[in-house]
Structures are given as structure tokens and as C-alpha cells.
Image (cartoon, rainbow, N blue to C red):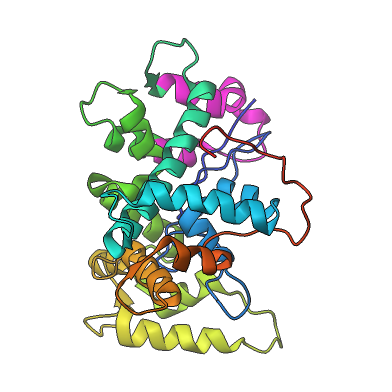
Amino acid sequence: MIRPLLMCVVLCVVYGSSKPTEKKSRVHEDEPLSNLEHDDHKNHDYDHEAFLGEDQAKAFDQLSPEESRRRLGVIVDKMDQNKDGFVSEEELKDWIRRTQKKHVYDNVEQQWRDFDVNDDGVISWEEYKNVTYGSYLEDPQDSEFDYSHMMLRDERRFKAADRNGDLNADKHEFAAFLHPEEQEHMKDIVVQETMEDIDKNGDGFIDLTEYIGDMHTSETGEEEPEWVESERQQFSEFRDKNKDGKMDKEETLDWILPSDYDHTEAEAKHLLHESDANQDQKLTKSEILNKYDLFVGSQVTDFGEALLQHDEF
């Protein structure tokens, strides 16, 4: 059975049940802490996933408000690292960062069992290739699609993640392979893969047509959504920094992995601003629990209150 590697920019890799697919999700700057829309006027789902992680956010959604508040109280005690009775912005940032890293390494552990075939504590390129592309390798002519390009692309990323060059990935190297956006030394691979996917004319740049075309495909006679024009302005005013009508590698890096904007810091400031009733730039447990629906989800009934009982709660 062939399994595909799909990189998600959040922060996950999804494996299919049959064969590789041509689709490659990429890292974009919009929603690094969650794939959900961040619009507090609609709901706080983005904040829930940023604060708890996707799996825990879903778990809290099954709880009653009372149980959700109780569990949030346990988390608040953990966030208060210096035990001064307050949660600072820095402590909020640390918690969100740990939440996101846990999501990455939980994903690595899940994939590890599939690919460490001989259970020797490392995943070789041969193991990964055979598990992912096994049936294609056995009979390429029997496949509807030529997966050789995908395999070469995966091999290039695997070798970039393999810091010691032994073609065996330990868990840190495998994490870099699955989530290259998380590692400084993998940024060039992230940019290269992004440009390969969007640069349709193969000139080594991303022009406006390719940039918009990656996000939206217009049908004949279809009215263009308003956000498309907004993205055109974004391209002209911010993406294309040297105003030559296209994005080079450096400009693409600034787009997908911006160094001048910390999403974790922005989310921590947002949670602090929305919860800090007395505006003293730190949160008490009461202030957080009073705004519990901002931090965590719940149900209006007690259905599911007994679900997903973990030791930490």
C-alpha cells in the first residue's frame, strides 16, 4: 500500500489510505496556529486551537461549561510557572508554543510507528520510500500517475532534514522532515517546494497571475470575490518588495515564513487584551475563567462530560 506525505502549514501531515496524490499543501503565513478563520465576531474556534491544540480543543467542545471551566483552571495553574498567582504575556506565549510543539511531536510519534519498519529506532530513507511508494516501485507501469517526481522531492527533503547525512532519520530529523516549517535549516526547502508548486511557467519567480491563481481559479463568467482584489493589493504593496512584478526566493520566504511577525506573540496579546479586566497587563485565574469561552470550548449540556478523561485533569 502506498501512503502520501502531505505537508500542512499549521502544523500537520496527513496520510491517505491508498496511494500518493499530486496535491501538496504548503506553509502560508495566514493561520500558523490553526487552519481555522480567526474572527471573534463569529466564534473563538481559532483561539481554542491556538491555546489548546486541535485535539484538546475538540475534547473541550464535548464538555459542559462547568467541566470546561474546571479543566481550564488546571491549565491556568500550569501556565503560572513562577507561582505568583498571575499569568503574564510571556507565560501565555510559552504555553501556546508548548501546545504547538506538542502537536508536532504527537504527529511524529503517530507516523513513526508506520515507518520504523524494523523497529531499530531510526527511519531510513529506504524504509520511508518503501512504505510510501511500495506498490508504485513494484510496478510503475501499473500506476495511473508517475510518482517519480514526488519521490525525488521527498528524498530531497529527507536529505535536508538528515543533519548527519547517514540517510537515517532519528525523531528530531523526522520531525524536521514532516514539519520543515518548524526548523531554521529547512526554510530553503519550504521556499523551494512552494515556488515549484506556484511557479507555473518555470522562470524561478512567482508573478501576480501565479500568485492569484494558486488561491483562486475563476470560472468563465464568474464574478471575482472581493478578497481577490485585496490579495492583488497585498502582492503589489507588500509581497513584491522590489516592485519588479514578481516574487523571488527572498520575497517568497517573507511571505510564507515572515520573520517580522510572531503569531504566537500576537495570539498571546489578543488573549491578554480580551481577558485583562483591570488592564494591569497580567491575568488572574478569575479573569481567565470569567472569559473561559475565549480560551476553551464547551457544550451547553453536560453531554460528553465523562469523555476523554485524562490524568492531567
Question: Residue at 39% across / 24% down in the picture?
Answer: 125
In the foreground, 217 or 32? 32
Question: Residue at 42% across / 78% down in the picture?
Answer: 277
Asked whether residue 164 appears in the rendered view, the answer is yes
Asked whether residue 203 appears in the rendered view, the answer is no
Residue 71 image offset from top left, x and y in percent: 55, 49
Residue 140, magenta (yes or no):
yes
Which secondary structure is most common in the magenta stretch? helix
Residue 296 placement, left or right of 80? right
Is residue 255 placed above or below 87 in the rendered structure?
below
Residue 182 placement, left or right of 226? left
Residue 184 image offset from top left, x and y in percent: 23, 49
Is residue 243 placed above or below 292 in the rendered structure?
below
- State how many labels appear: 0
Is residue 3 placed above or below 12 in the rendered structure?
above
Residue 32 image offset from top left, x and y in percent: 43, 60
Residue 288 placement, left or right of 216? left
Residue 219 image offset from top left, x and y in percent: 69, 79
Is residue 289 placed above or below 180 in the rendered structure?
below
In the foreground, 9 or 239? 9
The range drawn in magenta is: 126-154
In the foreground, 2 or 79? 79
Question: Residue at 46% across / 43% down in the picture?
Answer: 103
Image quarter hosting the C terminus: top right
Residue 277 placement, left or right of 87? right
Q: Quadrant of residue 285?
A: bottom left
